[in-house]
């Protein structure tokens, strides 16, 4: 599994979440909503500077974006791409089947 954060999404995190060098963002499944990879679950994130068991991460400008091993099931064999949609002023998550 791989995580990719676009430059515009990275800027959104710095502006809206006020991320700075050394901060770590954890992506995790939430028990409501839907996603293309899991019905009944959506993807959330939190700033969590105490990772437990990182299975994959994306690092840029000294900031980490990661998924812990216990949450890998959510992605169901998919990579995560995080982009920013200027029209809706929101993050967008895309899921691509990971190469085997």
Image (cartoon, helix red, strand yellow):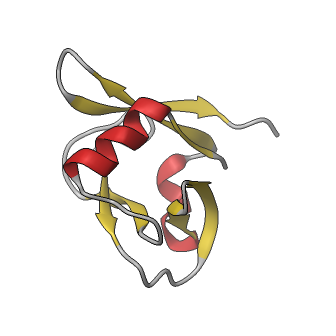
The quadrant in which residue 99 appears is top right
Q: Is residue 42 visible?
A: no
The answer to whether residue 92 is left or right of residue 63 is: left
View extreme (right): residue: 100
Q: Residue at 67% of width from left, 49% of height from top?
A: 1
Residue nearer the viewer, 32 or 4: 4
Q: Residue at 60% of width from left, 72% of height from top?
A: 54
Q: Position of residue 90 (x, y in %)?
A: 22, 31
Q: Residue at 47% of width from left, 53% of height from top?
A: 74
Q: Position of residue 59 (x, y in %)?
A: 60, 56
Q: Position of residue 32 (x, y in %)?
A: 19, 51
The answer to whether residue 82 is left or right of residue 90 is: right
Q: Is residue 54 above or below residue 86?
A: below
Q: Residue at 36% of width from left, 40% of height from top?
A: 11
Residue nearer the viewer, 37 or 22: 22
Q: Quadrant of the C terminus?
A: top right
**How many tags in the picture?**
0
View extreme (top): residue: 87
Q: Is residue 95 above or below residue 56?
A: above
Q: Position of residue 38 (x, y in %)?
A: 40, 43
The quadrant in which residue 93 appears is top left
Residue nearer the viewer, 99 or 25: 25
Q: Is residue 34 visible?
A: yes
């Amino acid at each position: 599994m791989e995580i990719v954060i676009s430059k515009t999404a990275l800027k959104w995190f710095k502006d809206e979440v006020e991320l700075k060098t050394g901060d770590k963002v954890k992506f995790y499944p939430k028990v409501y909503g839907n996603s293309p990879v899991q019905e009944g679950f959506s993807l959330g994130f939190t700033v969590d500077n105490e990772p437990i068991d990182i299975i994959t991460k994306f690092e840029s400008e000294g900031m980490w974006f990661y998924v812990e091993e216990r949450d890998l099931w959510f992605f169901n064999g998919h990579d995560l791409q995080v982009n920013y949609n200027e029209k809706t002023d929101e993050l967008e998550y895309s899921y691509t089947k990971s190469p085997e």
